[in-house]
Amino acid sequence: MTNKTAQPLGTQRYGWVIVGVLLLIQTVSSGLGFYNMSVYINRLSAELAVPVSDISFAVSLFFVVGGVAGLYIAALLTRFKVRTIMIAGTLLAGLALGLVGMATEVWHVYGLFALFGMGNAGISLVVATTLITQWFPGAERSMALAVTSTGLSLGGVVLTPLSAYLLNTIGVAETMPLLGLVLVLFVVPLCFLVRQPPGSEISSSAQTMDTNAALLASAVNSRFFALMALAYVLTMAAQVGGIAHLYNRVEQITDYQTAAYAVQALSICSIGGRFLGGWLVSRIPIRWFALGNLCLQALGLTCIAFAPSGSFALLAAGLFGLSVGNLLMTQPLWLAEIYPSQIYARVFARANAISVVGVAIGPYSMGLIFDAFGGSTYTQAYLAGVTLSVTALAIVITASRPSRMRTYRDLTPD
């Protein structure tokens, strides 16, 4: 099971500094990446005069490449200083994002979004959750992760409305280099404050490497890991697809300002929901926490699908947002509860890479469904997200049934 050894007081205090720094980094990373994707789809589709599904595929590339890159980031964390990895990722992501403003063909956007995803992997979830797991081995982990991952939602509150305003007023060519510059100038200085806790270094001895390889193989071949990975493919397809097209969905029935407010409402409710979730998940079984949030996601997507007005869409976006942060937080918490810290980064990187399949197909599939119905309604696309959420719910029920649940101790090789 995960090591619960107490840390020295000074180490615990700096752990909260790490939480604050990661919160700010995640704010910029997710604001210019995750949450801004709905705005990019809208403006790049109009700028290049191509169907929504074409730009949705670029967004899918961002997530797929980022997920695959996360596997390598997890391995690099055992060989290089974490700040080195984060600075290199920031520079690559900032350069790629800025160059999107010069794109004149769809394939230019594909290549740049792939590079953006690769660089963003160096400052996103794999690094952040690994650091939190190392700095907080005990009961404070859920709240530390809740605070850190709040940055994922703050990005939508702070940066998405500003990005939408700039893209709609001064244009793509002028705005994208500015956004790339913001990413580099804000994140690089923060990276110098990041470090791993004392004693977290992984031994490079042959015996230790062989033991960890055996533990990792047992973990990723377990029934729980396989079913949860499948459930998160479906969960992320519904969630990210719903977020990526929310701006377009709301703009259809109102205007771009209300659409930006809908993304903002989703983000604000995600923040509130995550803080409540960080408190709640330490008091109830994580199984019920996950099931409740999947039900909430299905309900929120249903309300967005049938929203008749801008005001109703804002409420629906907020309802959906309550589940967003908590579902993102549940996977790393559940894995950290079951698997030991010495293989956590690689276990989570694999789970994250698999779930990225859903992250990738969600925006693209919803774009295809939207185009298939003549580009006039998003109802069918969002109902597809509801179906995926309900299917994921059934899989999680099966995977985590108390009578069948196997802890990591059952998987440890003799």
Image (cartoon, rainbow, N blue to C red):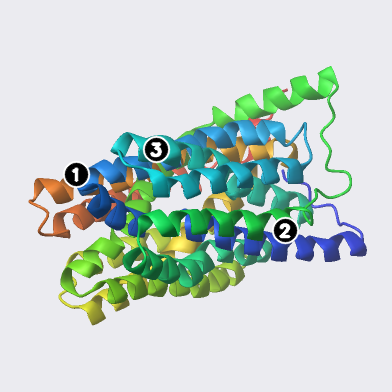
Q: Which residue is mark 3?
A: 61
Instruction: Work out which quarter of the rendered image holds the N terminus and state it.
Output: top right
Q: Earlier in the sequence, mark 1 or mark 2?
A: 2
* Circles 1 and 2: CB atoms closer than 8 Å: no
Disc 3 to disc 1, C-alpha distance: 15 Å
Disc 1 to disc 2, C-alpha distance: 39 Å
Q: Amino acid at mark 3?
A: Leu
Residue at 62 percent of width and 45 percent of height: 91
Residue 285: x, y in percent? Answer: 55, 60
Q: Amino acid at mark 2?
A: Leu
Residue 332: x, y in percent? Answer: 58, 49
Badge 2 crowding class, 10 Å Cα cut-off, few under 14, some 14 to 19, many 20 or more, is some
Q: Which residue is mark 1?
A: 368
Q: Which residue is mark 2?
A: 190
Is 319 rendered above or below residue 46?
A: below
Residue 21: x, y in percent? Answer: 71, 62
Determine whether the residue tagged by mark 2 lies in a helix, strand or loop: helix
Badge 1 crowding class, 10 Å Cα cut-off, few under 14, some 14 to 19, many 20 or more, is some
Is 303 rendered above or below residue 191?
A: below
Disc 2 to disc 3, C-alpha distance: 27 Å
Relative to 101, 374 lies left or right: left
Q: Amino acid at mark 1?
A: Leu
